[in-house]
Image (cartoon, rainbow, N blue to C red):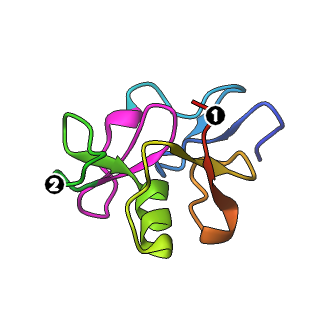
Amino acid sequence: MMNNTNRLCVCGCGGTVGMGKRFIAYHHLRKNPIVGRIFHYFGYPLTYMSEHLRADTKGYVREHMLIMEKSLGRPILKSEAIHHIDGDVTNNFLLAILCFSSLT
């Protein structure tokens, strides 16, 4: 049984991590069984899409960006930001993310 100080590792291994942690050491480097999907160190699910404008140097894009772009039918502008309403970076359901103009 898990107490309030432990929760499950975000990588999906079933292991528990201490309070304030998201992963067991080095588990953020593990590939998910879904091909082309990994997790960022901060817990964001990433999808391999090297041709995307917002792809990182390894070719991965944060999934919440892809989901919002599909919903809007256009790319996210540099002046826009995506926010997880519930604060859970792994919850990429359309009702849990919001696109807004950033202040920069």
According to the picture, the residue beneath numbered tag 2 turns out to be: 51
Q: Earlier in the sequence, mark 2 or mark 1?
A: 2
Which amino acid lies under the numbered mark 1 shown in the image of this protein?
A: Leu
Q: Which residues are magenta?
A: 27-47
Callout 2 crowding tier (Cα within 10 Å): few <14, some 14–19, many ≥20: few
Left or right: residue 40 compared with residue 19:
left
Q: Position of residue 101 (x, y in %)?
A: 61, 47
Marks 2 and 1, how far apart at CA: 28 Å
Q: Is residue 1 above or below residue 24?
A: below
Q: Is label 2 in a helix, a strand or a loop?
A: loop
* Front in this rendered view, residue 6 or 95: 95
Which amino acid lies under the numbered mark 2 shown in the image of this protein?
A: Glu
Q: Position of residue 40 (x, y in %)?
A: 41, 38
Label count reads: 2
C-beta proximity under 8 Å, tags 2 and 1: no
Q: Is residue 29 magenta?
A: yes
Residue 103: which disc?
Answer: 1
- Furthest residue to the left? 51
Q: Is residue 102 magenta?
A: no
* Front in this rendered view, residue 39 or 27: 39
Q: Position of residue 71 (x, y in %)?
A: 50, 74
Q: Is residue 23 above or below residue 75?
A: above
Query: Which residue sits at x=54%, y=50%?
Result: 14
Front of the two marks 2 and 1: 1
Residue 90: which disc?
Answer: none
